Image (spheres, helix red, strand yellow):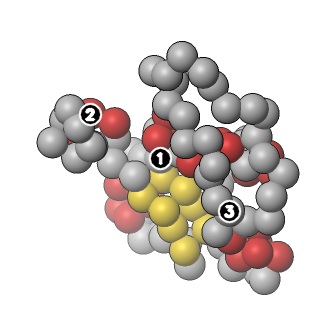
Amino acid sequence: DSPIIDNASPHRAYQPQPPYDLPSLPAALGAGGHDWRNYADQNASYFRHIAHLVDHPSNVPSDQFDRDVGNGYLPAVCWLYAPEGQSEHPPRN
């Protein structure tokens, strides 16, 4: 998977450069004909740091996961991030 070098949060004084132009696991999955989804709220999504994934339609809000499961659809590969308020990272743990 593509490394996230800066790992900056919106609360830091500095912000990362424009999204990186790197190969990625989602791109390789798509090229191989495999569907994928990234279930994450925008602030939690590391995919926003990779240029070709920024506005990709497979990036959906985390609450879309419940709807997809209810409809009997999950992609071959998915990333699921809890909503920010339910994160186990400090200070929320």
Query: Which of the 4 image quadrants contains residue 19?
Result: top right
Answer yes or no: is residue 3 visible: yes
Which quadrant of the rendered structure holds the C terminus?
top left
- Residue 85: assigned label: 2
Any part of residue 61 in sight: no
Q: Which residue is mark 3?
A: 2
C-alpha separation, residue under disc 1 versus residue under disc 2: 12 Å
Q: Residue at x 22, y 46 (%)?
A: 88
Seen in the picture, residue 27 relative to 61 is either above or below; the reply is below
The vertical placement of 40 against 24, above or below, is: above
Rendering coords of residue 68 (x, y %): 44, 60
Horizontally, residue 54 falls left or right of residue 86, namely right
Nearer the observer: mark 1 or 3; the answer is 3
Secondary-structure class at tag 2: helix
Q: Amino acid at mark 1?
A: Ala
- Element type at mark 3: loop
In whole angstroms, how far apart are the C-alphas of marks 2 and 3? 26 Å
Query: Of the residues shown, which amino acid type is indicated by label 2?
Result: Gly
Upstream in sequence: badge 1 or badge 2: 1
From the viewer's perspective, tell me whether residue 8 is left or right of residue 50. left
Single out the residue that lies furthest toward the left: 93
Q: Nearer the viewer, mark 2 or mark 3?
A: 3
Question: Looking at the image, which is closer to me, 7 or 48?
Answer: 7
Q: Is residue 59 above or below residue 91?
A: below
Q: Rate crowding at label 3 as few (under 14), some (14 to 19) or many (20 or more) other CA atoms within 10 Å.
A: some
Q: Which mark is residue 40?
A: 1
Q: Quadrant of the rendered structure where residue 58 is?
A: bottom right
Whichever of callouts 1 and 3 sits on the residue coming sooner in the sequence is: 3
